[in-house]
Amino acid sequence: MTELRWIWLIARKDLLLELRSGGRLLSMIAFVVLAGFLFAFALDQSRVAGRDVVASLTWLTILFASTAGAGRIFDSEEEDGAFRHILLTPVSRGAVFLGKASANLVLIWLVAALSFTSLNTFMGVRSPGSLAAHAAVLLPGTIGLAATGTFFGRMSRHSALGDTLLPVLTFPLLVPLVYFGATASARVFLELPWTEISGLVRLLWAFALGSIAIGAFLFRHVTDE
Amino acid sequence: MERRPRVAGLALVTGGVATMLLVHWMVAFWVPTEASQGVVQRIFYVHVPAAWTTFLAFGIVALASAAYLWLEDERADAAAVAAAEGGLIFGAIMLISGPLWGRIAWGTYWTWEPRLTLTLLLWFTYLGYFLIRGSVADPRRGKRFAAVVAVIGSLNIPLIHVSVSWFRSLHPGPVVIKPEGPTLHPDMLATLLTSLAGFTLLFLGLFSFRYAVERLGRRSLPGGAAGPMED
């Protein structure tokens, strides 16, 4: 069986489990909507235009929601020892990582779409710019978030500090991603030409591909069961 | 503690302290005052050596951590944790002395320019190194997780080095290691090099002591928390 098939099977299994239980996805969705709700009340919209801040708020919401979800990626398998059984199959640790990260990515895409829609609605943004350009910015950003969250989510699963450790480990590494992503999204909202955005998107792709490669390479060191 | 590392550590720390005393005299009474920034520029003789020592320490952590992941040799992990502690301390000196200098030179304690930001993130990454290490119940797993964090965090080090050249930055560029040679006044260069030597000796001395204590602590643990290659 090829590695790609393994990756697909692991991702499919994770997504089916998530759809049947729904706990993680539901909490991420509730978080995104409530965060947007709170941001709308926390900002004085008579002084601050929603369009000026919605890009930053979208990225922060996606970051926080994905970090909250990342701490639960391995929970369902860990409790009944199923993850140990996956590791006993003749599948490489890199493929396990990519499968888990792919399933995590699908959930983050849902969160990103919802976050984008709800924040634009709550902030009263009428012309958010090109949706295709927003998707082109969010795609590499969410890949980076999914890879980083999956990798460090595995570590925090074994830590007594649990979910409180995950931001300490991931946020210092994710600062460049959030900076490039929020700046690129802000330029899309301002409807600037693609030439002023493409450089940032290339940096986001570099971060995304780098985090996938490093995660797949080092994942065997965080799965030692 | 074994005699050899104790003597080596003592010699290095003594040399480091003596050199630091000399540096204090040079900075206070000998080196000329820089024309544009005035007396505050003397922070340079603390800030730059602290930065150099921090990157030396984190470089050792990264190499030792990579060696630990590869060989599972307890000596590599002991070296990594000893260097990481030194890196955090000298990193804190760098991160405190930099803003004190920046307040006068740039008019602000902090600015989000690339080198400062990346250095602060590197420091937080190595803070995470200790948090993950200490919070995992299985010590062997904790060491391996910490080593992974150190290796990933070290990718930041070359980026910090080139950030002054790659991005528009308030941070001064290199004044010593340049293709055309150092552009510092010879007395300033002598003071800087003496301070670099003092900080390096002090770090290496503390590192030797800490490494020896770490090894001693592991040997004395009941049942041995040591790995398969522990001697």
Image (cartoon, coloured by chain):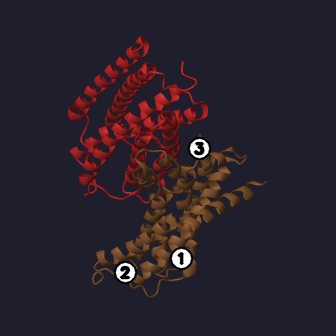
Chain colours: A brown, B red
User: Can you tell which mark lies on residue A223?
Assistant: 3
Q: Is residue A193 left or right of residue B222?
A: right
User: Can you tell which mark lies on residue A218?
Assistant: none
**Residue closer to the observer: B70 or A197:** B70
Residue depicted at x 49% and y 76%: A114
Where residue B46 sits: x, y (%)? 30, 38
Tag 2's secondary structure? Answer: helix
Q: Is the Cβ of the residue at disc 1 closer than 8 Å to that at disc 3?
A: no
**Residue closer to the observer: B166 or A94:** A94
Q: Is residue B165 left or right of residue B229?
A: left
Where residue A177 sits: x, y (%)? 49, 61
For residue A147, which quarter of the picture? bottom right
User: What subunit carries mark 3?
Assistant: A
User: Can you tell which mark lies on residue A134?
Assistant: 1
Mark 1: amino acid:
His
Q: Is the Cβ of the residue at disc 2 closer than 8 Å to that at disc 1?
A: no
Select label 3 or label 2 by which is in front.
3
User: What subunit carries mark 1?
Assistant: A
